Image: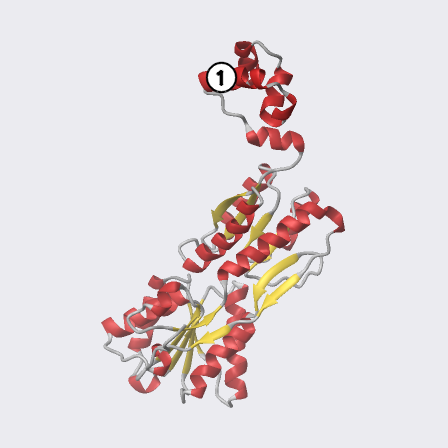
Amino acid sequence: MNVGVKDVAQLAGVSIGTVSNVLNHPERVSAATRERVNSAIEKLGFVRNAAASQLRAGLSRSVGLVVLNASNPFFTELARGAEDHASAQNISVLVGNSGEDARREADYLDLFEEQRVRGVLLSPVGDVSARLTRLRARGIPTVLVDRQTYREDFSSVSVDDVEGGRLAAAHLVSLGRRRIAFAGGPTSLRQVRDRLDGARAALREAGLPGPDVHETHAMTTAAGREVADALLRLPVERRPDGVFAANDLLALGIMQGLLFRGSVRIPEDVALVGYDDIDFAASAAVPLSSVRQNATQLGRTAMELLLAEASSGPGFTPRQIVAQPELVARASTTGQDPAHD
C-alpha cells in the first residue's frame, strides 16, 4: 500500500501542512511535533516522492548522461568525472548507454525529457541539432561531451580529435613506418571521422599516401580482432607496418589478433597506436601507445557547464571548450615502455 502525507498527518494528529514543514522546513516546527511526525513516518514506512516534489517546485535534482558505449572505460571515467562534480552539488546523474545506436539514444532523450531532468550531457551518435533545440525549448539545457559543436548557441566539451589523429600518424611516420592503416567506425561518428582526417593530414605532410581504411561496425575489442584477421589475410608485402586504431579497445583487439592468431611481432612487424589511453592500455601484453584525453576532466568540466547554464537560464553564454590531446608512446610503437606515464 502506498503511504502518503495524509496518512502520516492522520497518525501523528497534525495537519498535512505540518508534515510538509517537517519534511522541507523542520526549523519551523517544534521539537516535540517533529518527533511525533518522524515517529509516524517510521511506523508507516513513508517514503517521500522526491520526483513529484521537484516537479512541483520546477527544479529537478537529477541530470541525464547519454554515452556512446558504457563498456568502454573511457566513458566510465567520463561519467565518474561528471558524477563527482554533480554529487558535490547534491545532484544525481542518470546514465544511459546508446550503444552507438541512434534509436536508443533518442529513447533515452525521450525518457530524460519526460523526467524533466535539470539538464542533459550527451555524447551523440549523429546529428542531434534538432533535438538540442527541442530540449532547450522545454527548459532543459544540453552540453555535448566528447564532441565539439559548431553552433555557438550550445555548449560543448571535447578534445581536438583532428590533432589527435595527426599526432598518432605522425608518430608512426617518425618511426620509419610507411604503410599506415586506420581502423575505426562507423564513420558516421564524428570522432572517428576527425581522427581519420588528422591521420590523413599527417601522411599528406610526410608525402605519403593516405591510410588504408578498415571501417568497423563498432569500437570494440571484437571488432579489432576482425580487423586483425583482415590484415593477416593480406600478403606480407602489402601488410601495413603501422596501424592507428580510433580507440584503445579496437587497438587491443587488433593486438590480440595479430599476436595470437598470426604470430606477428609488435612493434617489429607492425607498430600500433590507440586512442583514449584507458587504464588497460599501459597493462596490455605489449603496453599500448595511445593518444591521451583526460576523460575524468572532460566529464567534470561538462557537468560544471551544464549546471551553470541550468542556474543562469537564458542569460547564460554557451562555451565550446576544446582540450588538446597528448601522445603517450609505449612499447607497441617504440619497443620500450616509458618509466613513467
Residue 234 percent location from the top left of the image: 31, 79
Residue that sits furthest to the front in the current view = 31
**78, 241: nearer the viewer:** 78
Q: Residue at the location (33% across, 62% down)? A: 222
334 relative to 146, above or below: below
Residue 323 percent location from the top left of the image: 58, 68
Is residue 306 at least partly visible in the picture?
Answer: yes
Q: Residue at the location (34% across, 68% down)? A: 252
**161, 79: nearer the viewer:** 79
Is residue 106 at least partly visible in the picture?
Answer: no
Q: Is residue 29 left or right of residue 216?
A: right
14 relative to 182, above or below: above
Q: Amino acid at mark 1?
A: Ser
**228, 136: nearer the viewer:** 136
Q: Is residue 79 left or right of residue 153?
A: left
Residue 138 percent location from the top left of the image: 68, 42
4 relative to 79, above or below: above
**Residue under label 1:** 39
- In what quadrant of the picture does the C terminus appear? bottom left
Label 1, residues with CA under 10 Å away: few <14, some 14-19, many ≥20:
some
